[in-house]
Image (cartoon, helix red, strand yellow):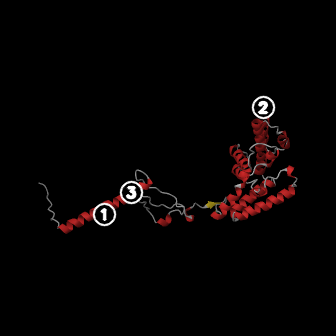
């Protein structure tokens, strides 16, 4: 025998209230698809990960929830130095001022090629970029930090954004060249706003100039290697004889990788002659 439950008929007002409540529930269910919920307090969310709502139509065709990093200053992941401490990045205006000054490295041709009437000579930035690639593709060397080599490669000529490319043929002594570049570097670091980033750039530059570390010795060799590789390419492309650049580096490589790559470049040059 079945059990029957008799529900009293609702009044028209009560029935309308019921439909209104159901409609709200349905609407809330729709909203849930476009919201991000946290099982714990929002204060536990890492400061560099701020979630915000995008309407389904603007986010993706299937209405999936998007979690995107907020671009406010507090949302950026903290920069940490080698000891794990947090370091502040340079302020945006200072960073852009610094980078705008560095644009001169992209437009200033290397003086040695200009003096030899090379057509469309590489810029200072071209030279440093390929040196950075040399550090990137080089084999691991015991006692040498490859990442540091890459940084040093893109910093070693940075003062030339102000003083230009001073070569031995310019008639400027090494002491005077170093003085001019040191002053230029100091100005650029102040422009960057000082702080840890500026000090890192300055320290890398000083270390390179003093040839004071295994990384500096490797990058010094990359500096010479990039020059003779470029000289070989100009000889092949423009029919120039750039022997003086090869002579200026002969016997001056300090590292095994520098010597090995220099021999490879010289071998390729002999085959072309």
Counting the numbered discs, the total is: 3
Pair 2/3: label in front? 2
Characterize the local packing of mark 1: few (<14), some (14-19) or many (20 or more) Cα atoms within 10 angstroms.
Answer: few
Q: Position of residue 1 (x, y in %)?
A: 11, 54
Residue farthest left in this picture? 1
Q: Position of residue 227 (x, y in %)?
A: 78, 44
Please say if the residues under marks 1 and 3 sit with CB atoms less than 8 Å apart: no
Cα separation, mark 2 vs mark 3, equals 67 Å
Whether 33 is drawn above or below 190: the answer is: above
Q: Earlier in the sequence, mark 1 or mark 3?
A: 1
Q: Of 247 and 6, which appears nearest the observer? A: 247
Q: Of 42 and 23, which appears nearest the observer? A: 23
Q: Position of residue 62 (x, y in %)?
A: 40, 51
Please say if the residues under marks 2 and 1 sit with CB atoms less than 8 Å apart: no
Quadrant location of the C terminus in the rendered image:
top right
Q: List the residue tagged with mark 2.
A: 272
Q: List the residue tagged with mark 1.
A: 24
Characterize the local packing of mark 2: few (<14), some (14-19) or many (20 or more) Cα atoms within 10 angstroms.
Answer: few
Rendering quarter of residue 231? top right
Pair 2/1: label in front? 2
Q: List the residue tagged with mark 3.
A: 33
Q: Which residue sits at x=83%, y=42%? A: 245
Q: Is residue 16 left or right of residue 269?
A: left
Determine whether the residue tagged by mark 3 lies in a helix, strand or loop: loop
Q: Earlier in the sequence, mark 2 or mark 1?
A: 1
Q: Earlier in the sequence, mark 2 or mark 3?
A: 3
């Amino acid at each position: 025998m079945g059990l029957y439950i008799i529900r009293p008929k609702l009044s028209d007002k009560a029935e309308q209230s019921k439909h209104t409540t159901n409609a709200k529930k349905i609407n809330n269910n729709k909203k849930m698809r476009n919201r991000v919920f946290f099982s714990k307090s929002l204060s536990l969310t890492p400061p560099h990960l701020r979630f915000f709502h995008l309407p389904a139509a603007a986010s993706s065709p299937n209405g999936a929830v998007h979690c995107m990093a907020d671009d406010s200053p507090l949302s950026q992941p903290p920069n940490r130095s080698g000891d794990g401490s947090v370091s502040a990045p340079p302020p945006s205006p200072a960073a852009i001022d610094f980078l705008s000054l560095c644009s001169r490295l992209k437009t200033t041709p290397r003086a040695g090629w200009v003096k030899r009437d090379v057509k469309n000579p590489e810029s200072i930035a071209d030279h440093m970029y390929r040196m950075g690639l040399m550090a990137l593709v080089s084999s691991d060397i015991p006692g040498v930090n490859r990442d540091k080599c890459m940084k040093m490669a893109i910093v070693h000529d940075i003062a030339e954004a102000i003083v230009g490319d001073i070569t031995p043929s310019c008639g400027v002594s090494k002491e005077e060249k170093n003085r001019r570049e040191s002053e230029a570097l100091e100005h650029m670091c102040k422009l960057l706003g000082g702080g840890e980033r500026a000090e890192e750039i300055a320290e890398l530059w000083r270390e390179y100039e003093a040839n004071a570390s295994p990384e500096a010795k490797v990058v010094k060799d990359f500096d010479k290697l990039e020059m003779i590789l470029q000289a070989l390419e100009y000889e092949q492309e423009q029919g120039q004889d750039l022997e003086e650049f090869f002579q200026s580096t002969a016997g001056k490589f300090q590292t095994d990788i520098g010597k090995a790559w220099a021999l490879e470049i010289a071998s390729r040059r002999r085959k072309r002659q």
